[in-house]
Image: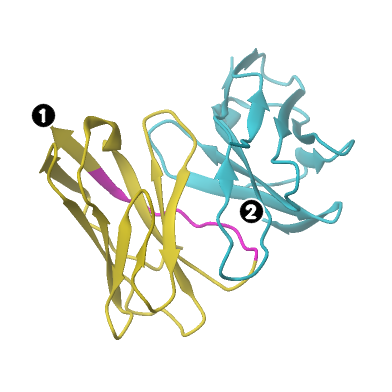
Chain colours: A yellow, B cyan
Amino acid sequence: DAKTTQPTSMDCAEGRAANLPCNHSTISGNEYVYWYRQIHSQGPQYIIHGLKNNETNEMASLIITEDRKSSTLILPHATLRDTAVYYCIVEYSSASKIIFGSGTRLSIRP
Amino acid sequence: EPEVTQTPSHQVTQMGQEVILRCVPISNHLYFYWYRQILGQKVEFLVSFYNNEISEKSEIFDDQFSVERPDGSNFTLKIRSTKLEDSAMYFCASSDWVSPRDNEQFFGPGTRLTVL
């Protein structure tokens, strides 16, 4: 089962930063935090992942707390196309399956 | 940009019939996966495949399911005798898993299976 806790839904104004929280208090030392999203009726899409340090790529930033018990995904300038379900996933350090939880349904309002 | 492709996009079948869902993973990837998503529910892991054998499978992946990599490019999921409850979106995914740091999985657009 998923080892993360996320809010069921959130909304954000277009053009503003969307901050999606995730709690993973039982994370172990070798587990990465991965974020995926699923736009309606499409396959899940990888966004970003990290172990300890904050990470940034062209899609988003990932902020991981020092104790690694929680993290925040930041979409810096949300657009309507960012409306999706966002999944925070803790994976083992192996080529393992992804266990999807219920995720956070993010709605971007014009 | 390389992508995972799946065919068909929609498959309608009668209960009890066999179906084969096809996937073309990203060419240099070595790990392959099938997931399914019943309408309105979570995405569920079915099976992972590496080096021409199943690495891991879920409870859902019973004897009615099988996977195969018949050639160097295709990865298939076969359901031998479909049931109504097999109606779902089926997603194929692949990864190259260079290291624990690089384990992102790339998903296809899915095949919607409808069992009547």
| Cα gap from disc 1 to disc 2, whole angstroms | 43 Å
Query: Is B74 on the left or on the right of B87, as rendered?
Result: right
- Look at the numbered discs 1 and 2 and tell me whether their residues touch, using CB distance below 8 Å: no
- Disc 2 target residue: B59
Q: Which residues are magenta?
A: A95-105
- Secondary structure category for the residue under label 1: loop
Residue in front for this viewpoint, B111 or B98: B98
Q: Amino acid at mark 1?
A: Pro
Where residue A40 sits, quadrant-wise, is: top left
Secondary structure mostly taken by the magenta-highlighted segment of the chain: loop
Name the residue furthest right: B71
- Residue shown at the point (71%, 27%) measured from the top left: B21
Q: Amino acid at mark 2?
A: Glu
Depicted B69 relative to depicted B19: above or below: below
Query: Is B11 on the left or on the right of A57, as rendered?
Result: right
Depicted B3 relative to depicted B43: above or below: above
Mark number displayed over residue A110: 1
Crowding near the residue tagged with mark 1, few <14, some 14–19, many ≥20 C-alpha atoms within 10 Å: few
- Residue shown at the point (21%, 41%) measured from the top left: A78
Where residue B69 sits, quadrant-wise, is: top right
- Residue shown at the point (73%, 21%) measured from the top left: B16
Quadrant housing the N terminus of chain B: top right
Residue A48 locus on image (x, y percent): 42, 57
Residue in front for this viewpoint, A13 or B17: A13
Please tell me if label 1 and label 2 are on a single chain: no
State which mark lies toward you, 1 or 2.
Answer: 1
Quadrant housing the C terminus of chain B: top right
